[in-house]
Amino acid sequence: MLNLDRRTFFTVTSIMIVIFFMFQIADVLRFFWNDYHANQYYEDAASDSLTGKDVYRIAEENAQADSNKSYVIYVGDPKSEGKGHIVSQWATYTKRNLVSVTSVDACTWAQENPPEIILLDGDYLNPKSDGEKIRQWTGAGMDVIFCSLPSPTALVSSQDLMDILGIARVTRENVDLVGKRIFEGFLLGGDGYYEPKNEEESAMRQDLVLNAPWYELTGGSKTYMIGLIEDKSVRNEKLPPLMWRYDTSGGTVFAVNDDYIADYMGIGILDAIMAEAHDYEIYPVVNAQNLAFTDFPSFTDENMDQMREYYGTPLRAVYRDIVWPDIASIMMDTGFKYTAMVTPKLDYTAEEEPVGGDFSNYVRLLHQYGAEVGLSGTAFPGVDLNDKIKADAVVLNKNMPNFYYLSLFLQDPNQWNEVKDEELLFATRTIAAPIDRSKPVLSYLTENVTLQNFTDNGFSHTYTEDLRLRGLETALAYTNVSVDMSKVPYPKEAGDRWENLFLDVSKNLATFWKPFHKFDKTTLAQSDQKIRRFLAMDYTKNREKDVITVDIQNFREEADFILRTHGERVWKVSGGTFAEIERGAYIIKAEKEQITISLKQE
């Protein structure tokens, strides 16, 4: 047995007491120094006065009359769903004026002020009569994008169109594919193979259209995306081309042999094409990576029987002891910030009552991780949304009466009109809603409130979703990932156990978002600020020798751009900072109204 004299015992005891108080005082100071009872993002948001009135609006009428502003011509209907909807968004986000006509014959311009490029919707082409005029355009040096192609039968009837597109012959009018591949250097994210290795991967991820016309291209073509076939002996350059360019004796022709432009990914495809058409391309982006957990946390022990069956404990304990540590690990491992769309209770027809004290505990934890606390407007069937918001207000205001909520999740953004006058929502500045590709990626829902539709589902990542992710990151450096936490208390199928859901979310975020780690991680309130600045700004660019100068109009604190180059590297940015995303692609953060970007050869 160890014997200690009194002096040694006193010394050891004193050291233990000091260590104990050192650890305790850290928590005490953290509690007093951090104002957990206020939304840490509210002050910045409240100081931002930008509204829908400040949005820079491109010209669609008389766009050609403005000789100081770049414009493009679209042969198609910009107000139609699909391709027209996407082309219109692309022009808006890149600040290009847009002229639209419904036929090739109606497509004219003044010789001294030609368009930057012409976009053609294949549905508006007359192959037999339009080929000669398009040949005249390319012969005069005009670049053309075929956003979709006429049918193989129609193309064969027009040798002019075949020649313009660089098609030597139609190998097959329709061929079955086993997958697709997009080559590195087009969309951001590197090489993309979309061919399942086994039946399990096929069931989880394969959702692409697996047939396409098979064209053989002539020399002078560059392929960006191909279809993969069963016969592995066929070389890449002979496989069915899905996106390509053909350099004519004058202009360059770009072709999209599928319906990709009709999807969100089409915005990024158009930006990638413009980068291929020019020696450099710089355009504004949002630069925001969001992660929102909807309907979490909640503070009610709902669906008790199923929770005990699945986890052996009530829901509040599941959230506290199982779910929250996993969410914290996702933030630490991926660098994503987190917006918690809180709901005190999901099913207001159930008898159980929320335990309001849980709320302040979660707010303190979320604050420490830089997370944002928003609200969820999920209302179960039979529950009026206004009644739910009023009931939530009773619980939330009792525990944190001066907490202001900037972000709100709604199943349908049109519901905002029903609840906008609720006192609990007076500070709301942005609405998050489920994926809806009929609406713009980013927009104002009302003059003062932005709409951020989710772009990705954290539980799923199919091949189409991966292409869409690459397209939106290329176009806007933006993603808005939703994680539907209502599946935990109310599982829809046997696999909806948290350990399975957590594995899917953590694996997807750590894998598919890795190429975009140089982009800013934001909460919904932070990305709302970035969106307001992005929609309000305009810019002009100019290059002299190795220096690109960008002048920004309606500049507010900062603005972000993506720069694409060919064989050149950025070595200096005056008035801002830069980071390399991948070879030939940079994220540029402007900190002043004018920036200069110095390039050098690789």
Image: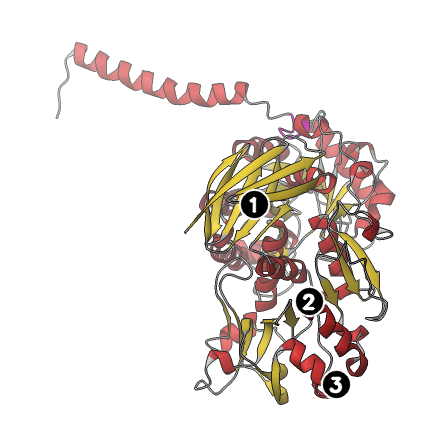
Left of 396 or right of it: where is 383? right
- State if disc 3 and disc 2 touch (CB < 8 Å): no
Mark yes or no: residue 406 visible. yes
Circle 2 sits in a helix, a strand or a loop, which is it? Answer: strand
Chain-order first, disc 2 or disc 3:
2
Q: In front of the other: label 1 or label 2?
A: 2
The residue that mark 3 highlights is 154
User: Residue 437 sits in which quadrant?
Assistant: bottom right
Left of 110 or right of it: where is 270? left
- Name the residue nearer the viewer: 487 or 338: 338
The residue that mark 1 highlights is 319
| Segment tinted magenta in the rendering | 38-42
The residue that mark 2 highlights is 145
- Name the residue nearer the viewer: 277 or 484: 277
Query: Tag 2: Cα neighbours inside 10 Å, few (<14), some, or many (≥20)?
Result: many
Residue 516 location (% of width, % of height): 51, 51
User: Residue 56 sits in which quadrant?
Assistant: top right
Residue at image point 68% right, 60% down: 264
Location of the N terminus (image quadrant): top left
Mark yes or no: residue 287 visible. no
- Name the residue nearer the viewer: 43 or 120: 120
- Measured Cα–Cα span from mark 3 to mark 1: 59 Å
41 in the magenta segment: yes
Query: Where 45 sits versus 343, above or below?
Result: above
- Disc 3 marks a residue whose amino acid type is Ala
- Disc 2 marks a residue whose amino acid type is Ile
- Measured Cα–Cα span from mark 2 to mark 3: 18 Å
